[in-house]
Amino acid sequence: MANQVGQTMKALNTESSLGLELISSLRRNFFHLVLIDYGLPKVVRVRRGTLLVLALELSKELRVYTTDKRVGVVLPPGIGGVLTNVALFLANKIPVNLNFTLGSENVRYSMEKAGITTVISAQALKKKLPDFPWKEDFFDISEWVNGQRKNKSYLIWRHIFIFFCPLHFLFSKSAKSCKSQEEAALLFTSGSSGNPKGVPLSHRNLLSNCDQINRLGLFAPQTRMLANLPLFHSFGFTVSTLYPLLFDLLMVCVPSPLDVKLSLHVLEKERVKVLLGTPTFLRGYLRKAERKQVSNLGYIIAGAEKTPKGFKEKWEALSPCNYLEGYGLTEASPAVSFNVPEQNSVKKSVGRLLPQIECKVRCPDLLTDLANGQTGLLCFRGPNIFAGYLDEPDTNQAVLDADGWFQTGDLGRVNQAGYLFIEGRLSRFSKIGGEMVPHGKIEDEITTSLGIGQLEQAQCVIIGATDPVKGEKLVLFTEVEIDAQSLRKKLIASGLPNIWIPKESILIEKIPTLASGKVDFQTLRELASQR
């Protein structure tokens, strides 16, 4: 199947611009559905030709509306968010999809960093986010779309013109003037360890990553993918938005991955084939899904955090699907490696590296290269890897070298067959008594010892906190009440060294998470420091 699907897909010109490639792709399958939007009062179905017509019209207006190069976008997945991003690419402007869940201070910091003075959103969303630092220069995309509906005769004429017009006449001057190495989009990291960092991604970065994913041959044209991940999330931006636009997949849009009830309804009604998400988001489906609601799924694609033990098996028992793990980072546009069904038997691997991506492993202390199979800091190089953070020269010097290698901060290894294994974040290790102590492994032992598991929710998290004697100590945050002495005995009996035993435990009502579904370690560190 993989080769057959791959042969039906047209390869991207990764040295082109997103604007040109989007025009070409949308025009090629003019009458195919591009998205179904369940985030509006009435379900809306949009064809690729209609999206292209509207995007070309909106791009002309945006070129006049603002002279700014970067433009803020505050919209969920759906026709408004997709249309806005496509139009900005066609106008040779840079969409900055802002994470409105980060809190007003982090958002304000991000906007100032990016130099944003114009925000595109919808009045209804603006009312729901009163604490968001809105700019006076506010473009209401809902009002604009409603205005277009009143001019049906003009839109019909534009559909006919664009369908029959030679393709090269549609390429706007702005889209043609873009160079592949220029910044195409700006995303911000979650800010889980300090202020958010701006990650500029070039046209080449994003086109290359979409092309790399396509070479896996997993998805046929018009495959239905649930698009409910935020546009400010790198996975949601590239994998469930740009990739479907460029390769003729059908996005079935739900405004939020937290709306499990609506998402399950949509999975069943629209016979969705592909479900994306972090294990944190996917837990909600396991708790509430009936078998008939997920009976059409072919793939569960998980990333951004470790899959808990037994989680994959639960999914594949509930649904006739392949549960596939991938690995990526915002700085890599984001996908780096991916399991495909025939590789999925390699336990604990996140698959082979995508085409054109190189990997080497460095010693965390000496920063010398290690041999295959050894665990160390993962470094990647390839056409999808960014060129550096926005206005962060010191950080860039620390994580990027002259040969283009990006040092991730993740610990892992690559075996002789080229499979990638992730051992954790360097920040999720503590150095105690000169020894590197892994938080994730201790969490696994604790959940096993207590018999609570982690399939339902993140019930315990280890944090490294300052210790006046040993420099660092382990603090356990847990959602369930425990007997510290009893737990200590069980952990020692399981073979854990004494320095691996948490020195302190804190009962918390709910482990905090970020909008991406990851644990909010920064908040937990702040709570630990207050003790």
Image: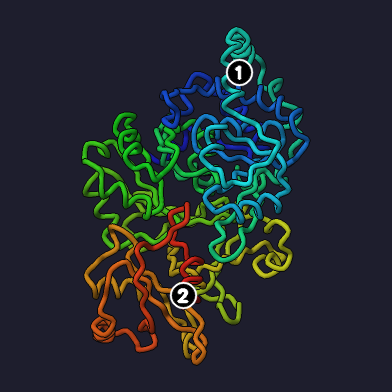
Is any atom of residue 412 visible in this view? no
Give the residue at x 52% y 87%.
Answer: 471
Which mark is drawn over residue 415?
none
Front in this rendered view, residue 512 or 166: 512
Mark 2 vs 1: CB contact within 8 A: no
Q: Look at label 1 and name its amino acid.
A: Gly
Give the residue at x 48% y 40%.
Answer: 240
State how far apart marks 2 and 1 are (Cα): 52 Å
Front in this rendered view, residue 470 or 29: 470
Q: How crowded is mark 2: few (under 14 residues within 10 Å), some or many (20 or more)?
A: many
Which mark is drawn over residue 528?
2
Query: Which element is circle 2 on?
Result: helix
Residue 449 lies in quadrant: bottom left
The spot of residue 271 in percent (x, y) is 32, 31
Give the residue at x 46% y 28%.
Answer: 35
Residue 409 is left or right of residue 57, and the answer is left
Does residue 476 sit above or below 349 in this rendering? below
Front in this rendered view, residue 367 or 408: 408
Does residue 107 sit above or below 45 in this rendering? below
The spot of residue 415 in percent (x, y) is 44, 68
Q: Look at label 2 and name its amino acid.
A: Ala
Residue designated by label 1:
147
Residue 154 lies in quadrant: top right
Front in this rendered view, residue 321 or 83: 83
